[in-house]
Every structure is written in structure tokens, then in C-alpha cells.
Image (spheres, coloured by chain):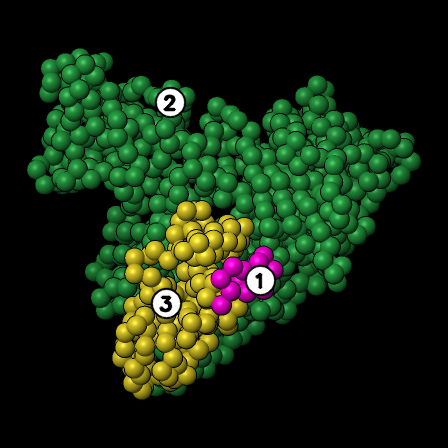
């Protein structure tokens, strides 16, 4: 066990964990930030997506010891009140079915919009590789375009 | 269950703990629950019936009786109550109801929640509304007929006086429960048939703890379980020395055929499990998928002795044929792959059990825990959170029962967490199947149709809609014994048979140079005008969806560079017809657009209904193109999503257009019916694009 001071959602949080513990389980089990989901454990499904220095990162394969001073943002810290344009677009278009993968989808999409404010369908295809068994991809795509429109009209 | 309308006295007032009121359906065997009218005390919630709770501050809570697995019933079922109750949807709250026999069938399966409860929930909402109206009328000393309701308030029409439902609870509790409340005229529906967002939408997008995996309780340990690595293997010697030394590991318990490691966090439980030294003994045959398919082929080549359905004489028809089609189709074993890996919380102590976790059958979990642990059912509670998908996996109770056994053995509250690898190796799979389809053709017509099927387990039953419209039709089916377990996978039976039957129908159309839409309409006309034997569907509804989707897609006017496929299927009470558009990108087909017409009776929530259909179509494209499970010596080769392939955004259509046939009939199923035709419609479109007939799932597009 070692102690780590992590920067999560703008706050410094201290945890004690084995060095090889994936960030996912530190978030969920040590810090009770359970919005980040476990889906596969092998960086395939994206349910565990968080931001690491503003980039989308699959937290299930990132050991806590490798986080260092990187700034982590989870779904709980994406916006103050759940009013990020993507969260609003997700609600407006009623994207979710079971909802389990959607936090990861939103985190992946929000990282995309930071680097690419108005993504094309091709850019969405290339970047959003998260799995959704319910099949909400059509609405996810529309919600990303809707949020981009709102962000760019500001 | 008996028809509600057949029992005049179906609504009775009964007491609930806390002093409120309960208006419940009296189901056979549960009459004992009905009791005399008891007024609520000042602080208790008032429940005019088991679906409606009004808190002391006037907050109205509607209870959704069936598990929410992503099919939207936590939203759609309360909409029905809210409509008749006459409340403001934006102001009410929704909770999942506890497991309670008074709710009847509290399961998620067979696309049955809305169709099973529509009439009952309308009546419950309307009865409660009438009680509030009567309470207000008595308070004002005016005739009830002079009162109306709006947004949870009773209004005296002439004077404009108002009383909210919250203000009327004490009085309403003294009202007689109307046996036959007046239902709204559907033309006055305010919510039913409109677009209403999922009640948990905000909690989902902000990452609130909603799911089983998010359960946290005082003193709870996290557990992982080492289960046999292959079907046919059983637990032998266990050396747990190294596991006990893993940081955070608290306990190791052996079950009959598995070993559980309990720890202070999930990662420690996983590391502890990896440190176990277990000898697994091969006690049965270790099976291979390749042998399953070889066995299927042998059986189909031989042919079975008895037919499931046999109309006319296919052999005579064959003699008159100018061409015989004789082809084999195969579908793989599939895992469920619901996004939330299985888990369950259990706290078993002092002869009682508390269970909380993802299941489509909470009552089944309670029954099986009672049996396995010898605890009376009344000492067991089973709660369900929102669930990260179901798709049939959670119709099995193994995850709940296992958690209860571990909690009992370890004497600790426990959250058992499965890894994806655990889910893949310990599923109740969609069975692998093989079909042999034969058709006798003349130069211009289809003379006979012969469907033969074999699959792991009990085999496949069912027929295409050509049965009932064909003079010469035969279907036969056989099971195949295997120690690999099978279960229900979204639209069981239909999801594979529709792929095969509708692909084969397209083969027939190509041979006969018939238009796939027009030729199908001929069949529905025949089924209507000159039915042969039993017709297991309504030809008029089939015709309606086929005509609607043809209109939506401008069938017959395919744009340049676009290739189209068509398929239709009836399942779970509903009809779906689809036109799939494919484009070739670098020689590879991509589904770019799908049109879908559905007849599902009355639509409750337009947004949710459309979402189910869009999702089922994407799920259908997925199973057509990507996943398969391969058994090698009893072990699943596709251990996780790097090998068990899934559709990604780049493979999903850009648009899915959905329309419903307008209907005043009661709602029919919606969680499953749009899935079955998809794979065939895609296969038929790819055939149009490439000339390649895809007779095996997942498609080989290499």
C-alpha cells in the first residue's frame, strides 16, 4: 500500500492503495465516485472513461501509481450541476436506455469537443469507440452534434 | 391471470403498514391482503393504491412495478397511471416498487411489462382520481359530476374552487374504492403517445449511483469468485495460502463448485482470486463448437422423422418443380454482453436475507434463495436497482443465489462482482443453431417451403409467415445435447429464425425475379383470403407495416450508390418491417440508414418506443456482423471484448427512421420485436450490393 495525492475534479484527494490498482477502482471503491463504470477491464468498452489532463482515458487499465500530478476529471466533475452542453443534449434527445455506458460516452464525447469543437460524422466515428449494447449510437451522434452547435453558438 | 374485467370486485381497500391505504388488485390467492378501510395518520404516506404514494408534503410518487433493464418501463408504466390520475408529469416522482406479490408479475421479459399492465394501470389511476374527486365533492358539498381534475388538483367547475390531491388525502382515505372507474377517452390523452424523457435521464448523465454495482453498505466486503474455467470441469483441491496474504483479503469461502475471495475492495478481491491455486478436474466431456456444427450438419443431412408442421405435400410439389433451392444457414453461440457485468449484494444473517441487485426476475431470486438457504420466503427481501442491460441474461438467478450463499458462508454483507471474463465464461448462451432451408420453385412461383432446424438445447420452434399462406409447407426441428448452458437472448427464437427465413425468402425472390415487398404482400393476401391451416399472425397488420415502410423509404427508387434490403417479422405481439440501406466504403458494406415501420398497438411513450426500436436495430446489426462465442475444450475462446467483437460508432447507421402504424388497440411488445428482421434486411442489402449471400452469422465480409 502506498499513499497518493490525486487531483480529481479540481480537488486534491488522498488515497491509500496498492500501486497496481487501476484508477477505476480507486475512484469507485476508495473515493466512492461510482459514476465511472466497470465494463471490461481491458480498455475495450470505454464505460470507465475519465479525463486525464483533458484527454479521454480508460481508467480501468491506468494504475494509480501512474497518475502522478495529472488532473483527473470524472463524470461527477464534468460540470457544476450537470449542465455541460453534452449532458443537456443527452437529456434533450433522451439518449439513454439502460444508461450504464452513458457516463463513459459523455466523457469520451466531451474530450472530443475540446479538441474538435465541431466534429464531422467521420471524426465521431473515429473517436467515439465506446460500446453500447442497447444501441443508442444514433442518438449519441445526434447529441454530440447538438452540443457542438450549442457550444459554438456561444 | 384472469381478465381483470371479468371480476367486478377487483378493487378493494386494504390497510398497509404505516396506516395508509391500499387499493390493490386482488389476485387469486391474495385475498387475505384485503382488509377494512383505515384512515391515514398525519405523518404517513397516503397510498390510494399500490402504484401511488402521496407524501405528507403533497409530493406524488408513482411506483413502477417491473424491473428497469433499459427497456424504459420505469418511465412508461408510471405514464399510464399519471394519465388517468390526472397529475402533472413534471411534478411527480417515480420509484421502483418493492417486490410484493400484490403487484403480480414483477419481471422483465418477453416484452411483456406494458402489454401486461396497460389496462390494470389505467384502472388504478382512474380509481384513485375518482376517490379524490369524491373527497373534494363531499368537502364542498357539491355533486362529483360538477368537479374536474387538472395537474393533481380537483376543481369545482362553476365556482373555481380548488383542492390539491395532497390536501385531500385524509378525506380520500374514507372514500369507497370505485369498482369501475371511468377511464379517459383516449382522444383526451395528455401524456400517452407523447415524447417523455427517461425519468432517470439526469441521474444517468451526472453519474449518480443508480446501478447494482454502485451498492455500498456498512461493513460490506467485495467478493470475486473463481468458477470452473470450462464446462465439464469441477472443483478439486484448493490452496488458498497465497490468497490469504494478499493485502485487503479478509476471507476465502468454498462453495460447491467455486471459491469466493472476500476483500475490502474489488481489486484486492481480484488479486486474491488470481492467487488461488485450484485444481480443476475434467468430470465431463469438454466440448468444442466445431463439433457442435459438425453434429448439426449430420443431423440435418439425415433429416428428422416427424414434422412440427406439415401442410400439403412438399414431396409432390418438388416433383413439379423446375428448380430446388437447398441451402444451410448457421448462427453461433452468443453471450449476452450486457454492459454491466453481473453483480449482487447479499446480507444473510439471523435467518433473514436481504438481497439487492440486477435481476429480471426478483421473485425467482427470492424463491431460489429460499430453497438453497432454507430461509422462509417471507424473511427474504429482493430489491432491484436500475440495471445495466438485461437481454435475457438476468432471467437466470445464479448471480443472486451465489451472493446469498457467499454472504451466509462468510457471515458478512457482500457485494459479489463479476469480471467480463466471468460473464463470458459463465453465461446461459443463445444456442448455436443450424438450418437447412429447401424450396421448390416453378419458373414463376414458390411451390413448397421446407424448414429444418437443429440447435443446442431443445431446438428451435416456430415458423415463418409463409406458413399459413402456402399449400405445401413443412417445418421440423431437433435439439442437440450439450453441457454448455443455454438461455434466453433478446427475442429468443425469433432473433435467429427471422434472419434465416427472411434471408431465404430473399433468395427465393432473387430466383423468381420478384420484388421482395410485392411478393411478401402477395403472401399476406393469400393468408387472409385462402389460409392454409393455422395462421399465427394478423395478415392485415403485416401488410400495414410492409406498406408503411415501403412508403417511408420510397421503395423502388433506390438512390445511386445505395443498396437496399428488406425484411419483416412478427414477434411478441408486434409487427416490424425494415428497409436497410448499405453503401460500400472501400469495398466494405456499411449500413447507413434504416427505415422501420412498427405495429405495436397504442404507443405509450413515443420517445422511449422509438429508442427501443432504434436500439434493437443497432443490436440487430451488431449480432449480424460481429460477435460469436467459440467453445474450445469447454472454455469460451472469446474471453473479453477484444475477441468478442461489438459494433462501434463507425459501424452504426447514421440515421434510423421509425414510424408507427396508428392504432387504438392495447399496446403490444416493444423491447424485442424490432430486432428479429434486422440481420436478414442487412444480409439482403449486402447481397444487393455485392452479390454475396451471407448464410452464416456473424457475416464473413473478408
**Which residue is tagged 3?**
A74
Q: Residue at x 41, y 21 (%)?
A: B187
Residue A7 horizontal/vertical position (percent): 32, 77
Magenta-tinted stretch: A115-130
- The earlier-in-sequence mark between 3 and 1 is 3
What residue occupies the far left of the structure in this picture? B42
Q: Is residue B37 magenta?
A: no
Separation of marks 3 and 1 at Cα, in angstroms: 23 Å
Q: Which residue is mark 1?
A: A123
Q: Which residue is mark 2?
A: B188
Residue density around tag 2, few if under 14, some if 14–19, many if 20 or more, within 10 Å: few
Res B622 quadrant in image: bottom right
Chain where mark 3 sits: A
Q: Where does the image place residue B678, in percent across and percent down from the top left?
A: 63, 45
Compared with residue B503, is residue B630 higher up or lower down, i.e. above or below? below
Residue A144 in view: yes
Q: Residue B460 in the image: x percent, y percent?
A: 64, 45
Of the chain colours in the picture, the one used for chain A is yellow
Is disc 3 surrounded by few (<14), some (14 to 19) or many (20+) residues within 10 Å?
many
Which residue is depicted at the point 53% across and 71% down? B229
Nearest the eye: B702 or B574: B702
Q: Find chain B in the image and tell me its colour.
A: green
Task: Tell whether B111 sits left or right of B224.
Answer: right
Q: Chain of mark 1?
A: A
From the top left corner, tell me how far across and down residue A65 is, in percent.
Answer: 38, 84
Which circle, 3 or 1, is nearer the viewer? Answer: 1
**Alpha-carbon neighbours of circle 1 within 10 Å: few (<14), some, or many (≥20)?**
few
**Cα distance in 3D space between marks 3 and 2:** 45 Å
Residue lying at 46% horizontally and 36% vertically, measured from the top left: B606
Kindly indicate whether the residues beneath marks 3 and 1 are on one polypeptide chain: yes
Amino acid at each position: 500500500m502506498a499513499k497518493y495525492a490525486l487531483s480529481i475534479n479540481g480537488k486534491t484527494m488522498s488515497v491509500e492503495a496498492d500501486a497496481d490498482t487501476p484508477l477505476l477502482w480507486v475512484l469507485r471503491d476508495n473515493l466512492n465516485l461510482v459514476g465511472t463504470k466497470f465494463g471490461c477491464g481491458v480498455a475495450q468498452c470505454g464505460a470507465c472513461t475519465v479525463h486525464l489532463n483533458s484527454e479521454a482515458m480508460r481508467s480501468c487499465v491506468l494504475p494509480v501509481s501512474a497518475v502522478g500530478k495529472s488532473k483527473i476529471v470524472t463524470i461527477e466533475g464534468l460540470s457544476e450541476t450537470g449542465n455541460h452542453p453534452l449532458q443537456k443534449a443527452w437529456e434533450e434527445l433522451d439518449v439513454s436506455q439502460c444508461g450504464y455506458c452513458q457516463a463513459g460516452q459523455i466523457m469520451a464525447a466531451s474530450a472530443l469537443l475540446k479538441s474538435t469543437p465541431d466534429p464531422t460524422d467521420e471524426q465521431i466515428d473515429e473517436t467515439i469507440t465506446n460500446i453500447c449494447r442497447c444501441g443508442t449510437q444514433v442518438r449519441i451522434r445526434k447529441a454530440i452534434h447538438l452540443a457542438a452547435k450549442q457550444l459554438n453558438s456561444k | 391471470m384472469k381478465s381483470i374485467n371479468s371480476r367486478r370486485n377487483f378493487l378493494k381497500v386494504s390497510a398497509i403498514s404505516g396506516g395508509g391505504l391500499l387499493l390493490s388488485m386482488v389476485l387469486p390467492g391474495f385475498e387475505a391482503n384485503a382488509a377494512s378501510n383505515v384512515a391515514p395518520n398525519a405523518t404517513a404516506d397516503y397510498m390510494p393504491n399500490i402504484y401511488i404514494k402521496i407524501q405528507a408534503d403533497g409530493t406524488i410518487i408513482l411506483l413502477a412495478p417491473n424491473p428497469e433493464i433499459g427497456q424504459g418501463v420505469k418511465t412508461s408504466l408510471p405514464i399510464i397511471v399519471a394519465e388517468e390520475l390526472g397529475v402533472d408529469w413534471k411534478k411527480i416522482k417515480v420509484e421502483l416498487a418493492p417486490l410484493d406479490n400484490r403487484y403480480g408479475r414483477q419481471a422483465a421479459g418477453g416484452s411483456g411489462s406494458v402489454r401486461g399492465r396497460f389496462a390494470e394501470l389505467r384502472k388504478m389511476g382512474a380509481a384513485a382520481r375518482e376517490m379524490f374527486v369524491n373527497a373534494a365533492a363531499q368537502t364542498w358539498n357539491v355533486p362529483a359530476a360538477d368537479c374536474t381534475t387538472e395537474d393533481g388538483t380537483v376543481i369545482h367547475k362553476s365556482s373555481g374552487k380548488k383542492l390539491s390531491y395532497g390536501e385531500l388525502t385524509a378525506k380520500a382515505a374514507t372514500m369507497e374504492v370505485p369498482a369501475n372507474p371511468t377511464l379517459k377517452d383516449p382522444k383526451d390523452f395528455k401524456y400517452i403517445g407523447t415524447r417523455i424523457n427517461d425519468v432517470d435521464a439526469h441521474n444517468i448523465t451526472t453519474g449518480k449511483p443508480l446501478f447494482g454495482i454502485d451498492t455500498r453498505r456498512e461493513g460490506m466486503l467485495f467478493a470475486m469468485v473463481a468458477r470452473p474455467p470450462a464446462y465439464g470441469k469441477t472443483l478439486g483441491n484448493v490452496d488458498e495460502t497465497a490468497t490469504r496474504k494478499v493485502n485487503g483479503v479478509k476471507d476465502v469461502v468454498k462453495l460447491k463448485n467455486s471459491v469466493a475471495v472476500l476483500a475490502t475492495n474489488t481489486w484486492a478481491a481480484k488479486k486474491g482470486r488470481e492467487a488461488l491455486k485450484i485444481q480443476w478436474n475434467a468430470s465431463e466431456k469438454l466440448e468444442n463448437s466445431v463439433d457442435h456444427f459438425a453434429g448439426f450438419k449430420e443431423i440435418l443431412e439425415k433429416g428428422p422423422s416427424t414434422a412440427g408442421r406439415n401442410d400439403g405435400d412438399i414431396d409432390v410439389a418438388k416433383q413439379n418443380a423446375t428448380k430446388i433451392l437447398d441451402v444451410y444457414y448457421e448462427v453461433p453461440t452468443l453471450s449476452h454482453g450486457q454492459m454491466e457485468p453481473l453483480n449482487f449484494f447479499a446480507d444473510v444473517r439471523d435467518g433473514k436475507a436481504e438481497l439487492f441487485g440486477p435481476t429480471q426476475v426478483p421473485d425467482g431470486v427470492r424463491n431460489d434463495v429460499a430453497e438453497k438457504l432454507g430461509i422462509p420466503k417471507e424473511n427474504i427481501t429482493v430489491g432491484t436497482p436500475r440495471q445495466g442491460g438485461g437481454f435475457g441474461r438476468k432471467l437466470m438467478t445464479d448471480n443472486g443465489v451465489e451472493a446469498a450463499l457467499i454472504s451466509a458462508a462468510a457471515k458478512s454483507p457482500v457485494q459479489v462482482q463479476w469480471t467480463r471474463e466471468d460473464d463470458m465464461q459463465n453465461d446461459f448462451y443463445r444456442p448455436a443453431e443450424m438450418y437447412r432451408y429447401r424450396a421448390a420453385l416453378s419458373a414463376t412461383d414458390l411451390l413448397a417451403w421446407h424448414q429444418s432446424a437443429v440447435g443446442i438445447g431443445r431446438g428451435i420452434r416456430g415458423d415463418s409467415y409463409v406458413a399459413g399462406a402456402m399449400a405445401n409447407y413443412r417445418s421440423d426441428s431437433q435439439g442437440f445435447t450439450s453441457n454448455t448452458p443455454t438461455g434466453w437472448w433478446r427475442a429468443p427464437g425469433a432473433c435467429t429464425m427471422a434472419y434465416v427465413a427472411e434471408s431465404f425468402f430473399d433468395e427465393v425472390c432473387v430466383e423468381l425475379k420478384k420484388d421482395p415487398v410485392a411478393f411478401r404482400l402477395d403472401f399476406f393476401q393469400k393468408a387472409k383470403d385462402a389460409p392454409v391451416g393455422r395462421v399465427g399472425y394478423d395478415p392485415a397488420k403485416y401488410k400495414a407495416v410492409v406498406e408503411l415502410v415501403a412508403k417511408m423509404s420510397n421503395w423502388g427508387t433506390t438512390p445511386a450508390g445505395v443498396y437496399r434490403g428488406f425484411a419483416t417479422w412478427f414477434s411478441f405481439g408486434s409487427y416490424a418491417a425494415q428497409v436497410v440501406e448499405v453503401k460500400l466504403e472501400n469495398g466494405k458494406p456499411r449500413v447507413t440508414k434504416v427505415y422501420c415501420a412498427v405495429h405495436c398497438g397504442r404507443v405509450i411513450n413515443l420517445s422511449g418506443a422509438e429508442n427501443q426500436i432504434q436500439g434493437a436495430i443497432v443490436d440487430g446489426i451488431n449480432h449480424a456482423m460481429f460477435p460469436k462465442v467459440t467453445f474450445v475444450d469447454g472454455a469460451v475462446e472469446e474471453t473479453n471484448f477484444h475477441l468478442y467483437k461489438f459494433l462501434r460508432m463507425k459501424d452504426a447507421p447514421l440515421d434510423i427512421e421509425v414510424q408507427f402504424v396508428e392504432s387504438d388497440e392495447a399496446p403490444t411488445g416493444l423491447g424485442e420485436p424490432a430486432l428479429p428482421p434486422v440481420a436478414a434486411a442487412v444480409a439482403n442489402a449486402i447481397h444487393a450490393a455485392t452479390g454475396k449471400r451471407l448464410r452464416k452469422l456473424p457475416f464473413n465480409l473478408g
